[in-house]
Image (cartoon, grey):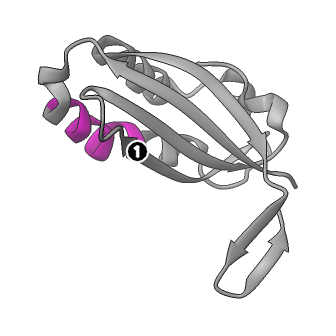
């Protein structure tokens, strides 16, 4: 199964809401998506492995959301993640709608991992 990285750029509608946004990501968005898309089932096309939120140190209100997946890169091209599962995940859809109320997403950029360097040396993705 392919190892894939997806990057979503997020620009908050108001940089003054950064604390609210970061709390939402930590307590609602990431846990909801992990619950909906983490793990393999008979209806899974891609499985969510890891999520990271990164803040731009030079530009307030600008973030990058990195998510790692197992599955085909093509299943991750939609903004709403419709292609990663054959079943509808209402809570995940609602969390993504709330994200879009807080900021504007651009992307996603989707990359297939080729080589990963870890504690045990380089290996293919």
**Based on the displayed image, in which of its 4 quarters is residue 78 positioned?**
top right
Number of numbered discs on residues: 1
Instruction: Residue 80: give x, y in percent of width and height.
Output: 58, 19
Indicate the position of residue 39 as horizontal and vertical percent values.
65, 55
Of residues 76 and 112, the one drawn nearer to the viewer in this rendering: 112
Magenta span includes 27? yes
Answer above or below: position of 18 versus 72: above
Relative to residue 80, is residue 58 depicted above or below? below
Majority secondary structure of the magenta segment? helix
In the image, taking residue 41 as reference, residue 58 lies left or right, namely left
Q: Residue furthest front?
A: 58
Q: At 39% from the left edge and 44% from the top edge, which residue is drawn?
A: 54
Q: Position of residue 52 (x, y in %)?
A: 45, 50
Tell me the SS state at disc 1: strand
* Horizontal side, residue 89 vs residue 121: left or right: left
Q: Is residue 100 magenta?
A: no
| Res 11 quadrant in image | top left
Residue shown at 60% from the left, 19% from the top: 79
Q: Which residues are magenta?
A: 20-30
Q: Nearer the viewer, residue 54 or 36?
A: 54
Q: Residue at x 24, y 29 (%)?
A: 60
Quickly name the residue at label 1: 53
Q: Quadrant of the C terminus?
A: bottom right
Q: Residue at x 74, y 26 (%)?
A: 83
């Amino acid at each position: 199964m392919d190892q894939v990285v997806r990057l979503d750029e997020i620009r908050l509608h108001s940089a003054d809401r950064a604390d609210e946004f970061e709390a939402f990501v930590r307590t609602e968005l990431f846990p909801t998506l992990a619950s909906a898309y983490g793990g393999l089932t008979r209806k899974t096309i891609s499985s969510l492995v890891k999520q990271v939120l990164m803040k731009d140190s030079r530009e307030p209100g600008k973030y990058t959301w990195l998510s790692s997946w197992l599955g085909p890169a093509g299943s991750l091209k939609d903004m709403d993640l419709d292609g990663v599962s054959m079943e509808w995940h209402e809570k995940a859809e609602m969390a993504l709608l709330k994200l879009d109320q807080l900021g504007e997403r651009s992307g996603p950029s989707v990359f297939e991992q080729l080589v990963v360097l870890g504690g045990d040396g380089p290996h293919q993705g």
